[in-house]
Every structure is written in C-alpha cells, then in structure tokens.
Amino acid sequence: MTQDPLVIFTPSGKRGRVPAGTTVLTAARRLGVDLDSVCGGRGICSKCQVSPGRGQFSKHGVTVAEDALSEVNAVEERYDRIRGLKPGRRLGCQAQINSDIVLDVPPESQVHRQVVRKAADARPIVMDPATRKYFVTVSEPDMHEPRGDLERLTEALRHQWRIDRIDVAPPVLAKLQQALRKGNWEVTVALHHDAEDGAQSIIDLWPGFRSEPLWGLAIDLGSTTVAAHLTSLEDGHVAASAGVMNPQIRFGEDLMSRVSYAMMNEGGAAEMTAAVRAAIDDLARELATEAGIDMRDIVEAVFVCNPVMHHLLLGVDPVELGQAPFALATSDAMSLPARDLDLGAINSGAQVYVLPCIAGHVGADAAAVALSERPDQSDDLVLVVDVGTNAEILLGDRARVLACSSPTGPAFEGAQISSGQRAAPGAIEAIRIDPETKTPRFRVIGCDTWSDEPGFWEEVGPGGVTGICGSGIIEAVAEMRIAGLLDARGLIGSAEQTGTERMIAEGRTHAYLIHDGTEAGGPRITVTQGDIRAIQLAKSALYAGARLLMDERGVEAVDRVVLAGAFGAHISPKHALVLGMIPDVAVEKVTSAGNAAGTGARIALCSIAARREVETLVREITKVETAIEPRFQEHFVAANAIPHATAGFEGLRAAQPLPEPSFNAGSGGEGGGRRRRRARP
C-alpha cells in the first residue's frame, strides 16, 4: 500500500503524513506548525509563504522530487506579478503536496516569530577602526600643471594627514570628479587600512564635510541564527541589533546535515551560500531602517562563524569538514570586498573581515569568544562554554588555553522536543516545580509575570502559551530531577511512584504535564521520555567536551565557568549544574557572558589592534579533536546520568538536595528490567 506523502517543516522539525493533494497550509495546521494566514487561504495576504527544499535530505531520510509540490497556479502567478514573491517561495494556501517534501517556514510567515536573543554587550572598546573619515581640501586643476584629480587628492592626503599611499577602485574613481566640484574642492574620504603596511583603500567619498558617522556590522553567523549589531565606527555604540533564523535550516538543522546536503546534491553548497547571503543582506536593510541611517554609510562588516558556516559564507564547499582530518580551506583571517560575498545592500566599496578559525570544527566564533573573554589572561582556570547547535568550549589561564567543539544538536534550541519551539512570544522560557505538590509554575517569553501570579493570562494575551523553548526544556528537566519526578538515569516515574496525576502514561513510558490548553484551542505541553533523552544526549556531549579538555590539562576541577551565547544569558547556573551540563563548581562561580561571540565580533570591528591580537591568540590555542578521542565517548556515557556518573558535588547537594528515586522499566521506565548502578547526584 502506497504511503501518504511525508511533510517535514523547519525550523520546528514537526513532521507527519498527509494525503496527496493537501495544501501546505492545511498540513501545517494539522501538524501544529506555526504558519500564518489571515485571508482564509485565498492567496491575498501572502502570510503563508514557505520555501520548499529540493534534493536529498539524508538527515530526514527523504529525497524531495522536483514535482513534490503542485505547479505554480494562477493565484500565485497573479500575486507574484503584482506584489512579488522571493525566488523559490510558494504560497502555502495554494501549493499542494504531491510527494515527500521538506518545507521551511521563514520568520515573516510565523505567527509567533522567534526572538533571537543575542543582544550586544555594552562593554567599553578602545576605538581603532580600520575605516575612518578624512576631510581634505584639494588644489584646483591648473592648465600649467596637468595632473589628474586623483593625484591631487593623493597629494592632499599626504600633506594634510600624512597618508602616503592610497588605492582606489574604478567605481569610486568614477565619483571623484563630481564630488570635488560639487564640494568646491573639499571632500570627505572614507579610507580603509587593515594591513600592517601597504596602501589605504578609498571606500567612498562625499562632497564637502560630512558629519554623519560611518557604520559597521558585527555579524555572528550561527548554525541556527544570524545576529547582527549595527555599530558606530566613531565611538563603538550599537544603534540597532537584530537577528533572524539561518535560512540554511531547511537544508539541515545541524552542521553535518548541511555538509551531507552539499555532498548528496549537486550545487547544494552554492544553494546554501546564496540563501545565507540573502538573509544577511535583508538583515542589514532591517538594521539600517530601524536606526534611520543611509545604507551607504555602512562601510565595513566583521563575521564570526563556525567552520561550516565560514566555508558556506565564503562560497567554499564544506565537504572536507565532514570527514577526518576535517581540513579547512583556510584557517587564517580574511579581508575581502563585501561585493565578493554578494552583499549589495551596504556600501558598494565596503570591506569584510572574517576572524580566523582555530582548527577543524573550532571556528571563528570560538576565536571571537576567546577575544571577548580572554581566558589567556585569566589568573584562575576558567571554562568558557558557548552553547548552541554546536558548542564551542575553551579552558585556560595564563599558562595555556585549550579548545574543542562538541555536537550538542538542536535540542537546546527547542528542536526535536515534543512541545518544543524556537524562542518566540508565548514560549515557556522558565519553570519551577514544587517538590511537595509537583505542581509547575512558569514564565513565557514576552511576559514578566509567572503563571501562578495575578494578571498572567491577561498579560500573555490571546496568543496564549504556545510551547516550550530551549531554556524552558532545560529548566523543566532539571526541575523534574529536583522534584523527584525523574531519577538519575533520566527515567520518568508513574503517577503512583511520584504521587501526582500530572504523570501521563504513554505506552511503557510516562510524560509530565506542564500545561493543558486544549479546552481553549491551545496546545498540551508535556515533557516526554523522548524529550528527556534528547536533552541527555545534548548535555552529555557538552559535558564530555569540557571533561576532555580538563583531562588534557590534567585537572579534576575548574575554578569558574562562564556561560556564553543566548543560552548563557537565559539559564540559571543552578539548573545547568543540576542537569550536569557543566563540570561541578560552586554555583556562585558560574556567570553569564551574554553573546560573547558577537562581542568579539564588535571588538574586531572597532579595533585593528584586536584583529592582530586574535590572529596571534588562535595560533597559541591547543585544539583537541573530540571526534578521535576515545575518552570523549567514555565521558559521554558517564554524563548520560543526571547530573552525571562521576564524583558527586557536595556543595550543590547541600544547597539543593536531589532525591534518589529509581523507576524500573515495568512501571514506566525504558531500557529493560536489569538494575543499573545508580549514579551519585
């Protein structure tokens, strides 16, 4: 019997089978996918736009045919003709599903748009930008001295600013004569000088004196999100910050899925490169509009990214990063014109600087974290953890710094979780469970009130509670462990074992009910045994990477832990320790660094000296490759326990005693009836 087509939506990861001929919008509604529509499916509002994938998606086990969706119909043709659709986009209310399909729901098509929580850190930066403005007065041409306008501009820069050598591209040269004459032989010149020596390049010029500042973009290009900060090149302040989902998610949620897509589909790497460059261009326009500045004033951009994103940004096939020895096309820092990356929204002469990669799968984002947090200047042994779909980990002090990456996967982002969603208004982001009554209370994004406080439902609004995001599921699992609903192996107890009717039987396993909104047409939010397993795998990879670095340093403990990234700013140290995400340390020794990679990008954007520092720093960092270290697997297995199956941490136990329930398979556990040795909490 022929199966119905399988439809997979990204970035939510929700999937299911629907009869052939079902519209994308109908399929989304059946599967609980966050796809907007306000016109009743008449093809008028365009809120239901989706981007269909094509080719082989090995992660999902499907191959998407060219005719997986119905052909573009008259309604879509009319809308495209009048208002325009982005290339490759389809209207979900019109496109019908013919066969297996992977569909990406872009941010603007989501009812509950993701909150990309990577705000800029307002730390002081010593300003030494690579691009500066210079106001010069140029001598007028003379019939008796036949020199060109460029030569006289060069002479003016040499005499007035002691700048000896300049280069100019033909598009800028074409503006020179008109600018000089319009400015009555006075011009403001933007010069870029990134090298230790060599000529400075004219980025742009304006007639007369131009008081408006020059701007740059500090961009953290992650596997899941792209965050950008529009930064003044005069004083370093951030005028606007914004983020979007990385559109490459539709090709694969994790890095190896994207490498696989490039390997299995001809032109797949170029397709992913085009998608992310277009997203960056759109992000630049959004920031300039929000800040009310001229796009022409954005004259520089700095990128930090992991190696796979690094290669795809530069248009390099990442296939070599999918197999040992994980060779990079280049690990050095790069300076190049923005036009080489098809960044057409900003100044046509803008320059791009890409921070160096450390090695293998430890990329420019880890280098940016090192620049921001400077573990090499720490007097005590510090562990810096930047958590995302791929975690970067640094361990060091003044004596030595080590680094590794760990494939945590998308669970920390809320993906592959039964009630999970990306961080968006209505998503549960924090939760507490009463150890006595086992009753939860929670807080959602966009609402400062807790669910058991007066006014919560009025403040949440008609959108209600929509799901649980990464920080929420992490806290939920940790709270379940604290409340005795979960044993050290990660097994959820039954209602009889835990003493609460919130435990729901699901075959041989159980789930914990957080919120039931079905009577009001909302979702039923639970934590299932599968969710626990997904979090166990993610946190075990993170913990194992940290322990591997500790082995290399020959230490059993660290002095302090710094949590970086969006996760670090939104999860409590206590829950990270209870879950066993990080090595045991006193709770007060765990701090947040916010978006350290983005801060490192801003530092490099504002300072040539910082660029030289990070280029030197990465050469001194020792890279540890988790993929070939046998001890990584040993630590990974031990870390599957909650917190972990290593020596217990007495300080944490004293501050927050953990109960020791043990739920066997016959009463709701999974994995067989043989008793395992219980891990110490």
Image (tube, helix red, strand yellow):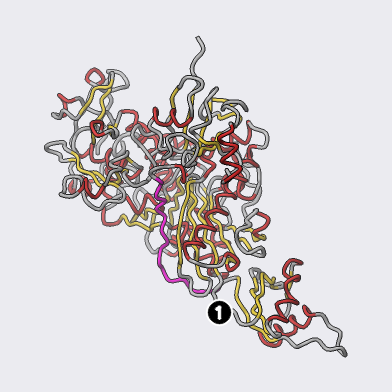
> Which percent across, then down, holds residue 417?
36, 34
Residue 647 visible? The answer is no
Q: Name the residue under label 1.
A: 211
View extreme (left): residue: 436
Q: Which residue is drawn at 48% across and 52% down?
A: 402
> Which percent across, then down, holds residue 411?
40, 38
Drawn side of residue 455 relative to residue 168, left or right? left
> Which percent across, then down, holds residue 78?
58, 39
Q: Residue at x 41, y 53 (%)?
A: 565
**The one of 417 and 629 positioned closer to us in this rendering:** 417
Quarter holding the C terminus is top left
What is the magenta segment's predominant secondary structure?
Answer: loop
Drawn side of residue 295 relative to residue 445, left or right? right
Please tell me in which quadrant of the rendered image residue 119 appears. Answer: bottom left
View extreme (top): residue: 1
Q: Residue at x 46, y 56 (%)?
A: 242
**The one of 545 and 314 positioned closer to us in this rendering:** 314
Residue 218 visible? The answer is yes
Whether the magenta-drawn stretch holds residue 565 is answered as no
Drawn side of residue 484 relative to residue 41, left or right? left
Q: How crowded is mark 1: few (under 14 residues within 10 Å), some or many (20 or more)?
A: few
**The one of 102 and 126 positioned closer to us in this rendering:** 102
Q: How many numbered marks have been drawn onto this rendered protein structure?
A: 1
Query: Which stretch is magenta?
Result: 113-128
